[in-house]
Image: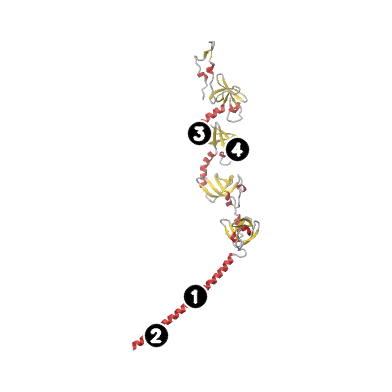
Amino acid sequence: MTENNIYNKLTNDNCMIKNEKGELVPNYDLTMVNLNDGDVVKGKVVKIDKDEVLVDVGFKSEGVIPRSELSIRNDVKPEDVLKVNEEIEIMVVQKEDQDGRLILSKKRAEVEQNFNRIEKIYENGDTVEGDIIECVKGGLIVDIGLRGFLPASLIDVRKTKDLQSYIGERCVCKIIEVDRHRNNVVLSRKAIIEDERKEQRKEILDSMEIGQIKRGIITSIADFGAFIDVGGVDGLVHISELSWNHVKHPSEVVNVDQEVDVEILGIDYEKQRLSLGLKQTQKDPWLEKIKNYSIKDVAKGKVTRIVKFGLFVQIEEGLQGLVHISELSPEPVKKPSDVAKIGDELMVRIIDIDFDKRRMAFSVKQVENPVEDKEEEKKVKDSKEEKKVKDSKEEKKSEKEEVSDKESNKKRQIKEILKEMKKEADIE
């Protein structure tokens, strides 16, 4: 701060000087204060007007504080901020304006002094407390001895819409950015709330289990899903888990601030987040409808989509399946569009139901000639062939056994003849 106490400069020896005529006159030059832009000096309030305040900063030196330079708060009345004869610190904004006046600022002097305090708080990781005084684009202004900016995204853990409702409240914030050159201080109230709730969330998460049904509130909606607050813990319902039916955007199913029941699909203890499912708390309409159908059933359907590898046919609202190109006709098919067009009605046979993937497979060519019938014919034919082969083998085996018996008898007869001949030879 610039020292502007003129009485420290005056002595008995220098208070009077001689002029050109040799007469002793007061040393006015010594009593004049040398001020520069940016200097912070002390002064005394002399007069308070509607739009400005007159301040004495030294002998024969007076300056004015415009109303806009009185306080960091806008639209304050001078008489509410200062009193006559009050000693204050002010900053020199302009040594001389177009009217030759010294322009001063009480606001800037306070900001300069408070920046030193704010920087220390920021370095130590401490918190600041102040009143919310103004709503601006993108957030709020907090009086912390200077104008601290509190972005809307850092006001609360939940998305904040009505910023005006915070005006006049006193809040504790964490300083997350300080830029003295740009006169910028960014605050976060959300960081304080999160620190307080972190331990609470840990206890809540420890009490949760996968598969539990919990009630929560939709806090925000994104293209990929909906964020839900479940007892103070953040969770995400991915768009694929919102409904059993196809969803283009989450807003088709849920709204912000809506209360919903969700199932816990996953727990991330490190990030303290939940993976949630909404459709799991509702009946699956596909499973309800599929109960009326079985494999081999024949049903009428309408072609809804044509792809290179076949046709998609809907047999009921919410129930459709694929007719693969190989199942369109007994004859080879080059293009599915040669068989049917979108909107055409077809009779199809259900040849497969995949309950896990909620899919069905149809066949057109098997409506009249099911594969099961052909397989049965093949089995009968194969059985007859097997019987013929078996009979043939038995016959051959029988022939071999007969030949073998004849040969055995012949050998036996020969042995008997040889024995008789040996006996006769021995007698003789």
Q: Is residue 198 above or below residue 340?
A: above
Disc 3 marks a residue whose amino acid type is Ile
Q: Residue at x 54, y 47 (%)?
A: 274
Image-quadrant location for residue 130: top right
Q: Secondary structure at mark 4?
A: helix
Q: Secondary structure at mark 1?
A: helix
Q: Which residue is mark 4?
A: 163
Q: What mark, if any, has residue 394 been given in the picture?
A: 1
Disc 4 to disc 1: CB gap under 8 Å = no
Q: Which residue is mark 2?
A: 417
Q: Residue at x 51, y 75 (%)?
A: 392
Distance in Å between CA atoms under marks 3 and 1: 104 Å
10 Å neighbourhood of mark 3: few (<14), some, or many (≥20)? some
Q: Secondary structure at mark 3?
A: helix
Picture coordinates of residue 376 (x, y %)? 57, 68
Disc 2 marks a residue whose amino acid type is Ile
